[in-house]
Image: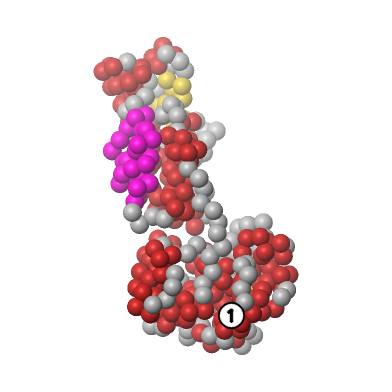
Amino acid sequence: MVNKLNLEVTRWPWRPKTPWAVNIPASVGRRRRRRLFATRQQAAEFAQDYMDAMLRGGADSALDTTTVSRALKDYQASKLAVASKAHAEKLRMYGYRIEEILGKLRVATLRVRDVERFLSKPSWGARTRWNALGYLSAFLAWCQRRELIERNPARLVAEETKKPEGRKEILSVAEMALLLRLTRRDRMLRAFVVLGGFAGLRSVECLRLHWSDIDVDEREVHVRPEVIKRTRGVRERYVTATTAFLRWLPEKGSGRVVPHTERAFQRRTERLRQRMQAGMKRAGLAGWQRWEEWPHNCLRHSFASYLLAKCQDAGYVAHQMGHTSPTMVHQSYARAVRQADAVKWWAL
């Protein structure tokens, strides 16, 4: 396919995911360039837009025509095909925000102020903002490699922003008791709280777990390879079900324990967080201010801390959590808790 000014759209078989190329000769664009696209139509549209911009303002202005919305569509098409389910869900979630705030802007005109506007969502905490900045930076780096933008403003913001510290957040016995009370009529959220606080499962593992993986008779939870988080730890494990776990586990169902996408699940947990904060205020419990956002990884950290205080064996705790070294338990998960509090936790 050739447009009216002989800017060719050709097949580029060496890139299976973006097999259509627009070759811009030096005689047209001052230096040779090649842009790759997922579909022939996208390549043809770019070629026409490029030549139209050339006629209006020359080679420099031709590079400014691609909008964030169009670039984002191509970026997601290239990434979603190979992304894991969890990563794909994050790509879509942050993609909605990018489209909403920056979609109509041209990629080449993006500046630091636009990145800061993207990050200014009131409901986002420090860690969520940091994660969102990472996804935006990856997208703009992709644009930079395709010469849609001269520099990556998100990277400039990241250089000036301090990464939030991974503080170990654990629940008090009173907070866990309140969470269990607030989820008494919601089987899915009750299962999430119990799996995290009394079995040490990660949130992403709760999302992938099936009810058939929980064996009440054998008192164990099978975390299959398809369920476990892809880390350098173990690839499969059996978690011993504690008495507290079996006591609070809701009636088993069928299918997935959490039959929602990650985005829908986050909306449910956000409502639970709001109810938790309101309940702590009413009960006069100290620490309700930290529930302005969900305490990061608090259920899994609580499990590690209270189990270590109970059994005094970091190797056993590491095995239950899917770690290959007891050092990980001390360095990244467990906090020091009193023996009396550990007794109360497992007696809930």
> Residue 236 appears in which quarter of the rendering?
bottom right
- Residue 243 in percent (x, y) is at 60, 86
On the image, the x and y values in percent for residue 343 come to 61, 84
Give the residue drawn at x 46%, y 49%.
130
The secondary structure making up most of the magenta span is helix
Q: Secondary structure at mark 1?
A: helix
Percent coordinates x, y for residue 94 in the rendering: 40, 50
Residue at x 48%, y 73% (from the top left corner): 192
Farthest residue to the left: give it. Answer: 56
Q: Name the residue nearer the viewer: 176 or 323.
A: 176
On the picture, is 104 further left or further right than 85?
left
**Looking at the image, can residue 175 be seen?**
yes
Q: What amino acid is at disc 1?
A: Asp
Residue 215 belongs to the span the image colors magenta: no
Q: Closest to the observer: 32 or 176?
A: 176
Instruction: Bin the neighbour count of mark 1 within 10 Å (Cα to Cα): few under 14, some 14-19, many 20 and up.
Output: some
Query: Is residue 103 shown in magenta?
Result: yes
> Please, is residue 223 above or below residue 328 in the view?
below
Q: Is residue 57 above or below residue 286?
A: above
Mark yes or no: residue 42 visible.
no
Circle 1 residue: 341
186 vs 221, left or right, is left
**Magenta stretch bounds:** 97-121
State the quadrant of the N terminus: top left
**Residue depicted at 67% across the width and 64% down the height:** 330
Closer-to-camera residue (145/134): 134
Frontmost residue, 26 versus 338: 338
Q: Position of residue 110 (x, y in %)?
A: 36, 33
